[in-house]
Amino acid sequence: MPSPHSGNVIRVPDRSARAEVAARCRELAGHGVALAGAGNVSVRTDDLVLITRSGLRLEDAVAEDITIVTHAGEVLEGARPSSEIGLHLGVYARTGAGAVVHTHGRSSVAVGLVCDQMPLVHYNLRRLGGRVPTVPYLLFGSDELAVAVGNAVADGFGTVLMRNHGAVSSAGSLGEAVEHACLLEWLCDVYLAANTLGTPALLTDGDLDAVAAQAAALAYGQ
């Protein structure tokens, strides 16, 4: 994709880039983590951001539902962006993330209500950075929420739970951010299911550190 700037002329991404974001939105909806118009998605492209429009139901997303904005929030093309645009831009301002996915999955919302950190139920938490903290409740669409989430991500937590709200996953690419959002929901499902049987056995921080070291030693996934 060419740079969005050519002299003083801003060149916006073509329709295919917006169509890819829309396809990922439909994928998320298919996983049941964005019911009833909840959730939003964005991707950074050069100096611009592609983000879902306000009021979008992700299962119905098409290219025209993806708005193009600057990092200052100025709309260059498309409808009014999601009310959580500040949250997305806050992550981009503080980190090198390439994409942000915000979901309202049932299990992740439930775990965020009672846990200050995602319990260490499985070594696949290392794919989310190892630890997933819960950000205290703050009003949706507020500057305070955007700052809190942005600060948590800047502190190294690419995925966070938001109390009484949902979850945010950021990553280098949109595909990875979607994968992380779905993995988080699976981990929360596992934790809640285990709780119905008894007290879940949890890993320690040291266990996760050892998993990360082992994966590096074995060049896991290469």
Image (cartoon, grey):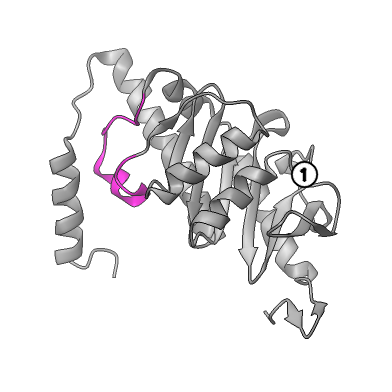
The answer to whether residue 116 is left or right of residue 73 is left
**Residue 33 in view of the camera:** no
The answer to whether residue 161 is left or right of residue 215 is right
Q: Is residue 160 above or below residue 111?
A: below
Question: Residue at image x 66%, y 48%?
Answer: 25
Q: Is residue 142 above or below residue 52?
A: above
Q: At which x and y percent is residue 138?
A: 57, 26
Does the magenta segment cover residue 9? no
Q: Which residues are magenta?
A: 116-131
Q: At which x and y percent is residue 107?
A: 47, 26
Q: At which x and y percent is residue 24?
A: 63, 53
Residue identified by numbered label 1: 60
Q: Amino acid at mark 1?
A: Asp
Q: Quadrant of the N terminus?
A: bottom right
Q: Secondary structure at mark 1?
A: helix
Q: At which x and y percent is residue 3?
A: 69, 80
**Residue 75 in view of the camera:** yes
Question: Residue at image x 58%, y 31%?
Answer: 104
Which quarter of the picture shows residue 191? top left
What kind of secondary structure does the magenta stretch mostly adopt? loop
Does the magenta segment cover residue 121? yes
User: Which sits in the foreground, 164 or 127?
Assistant: 164
User: Which sits in the foreground, 54 or 22?
Assistant: 54
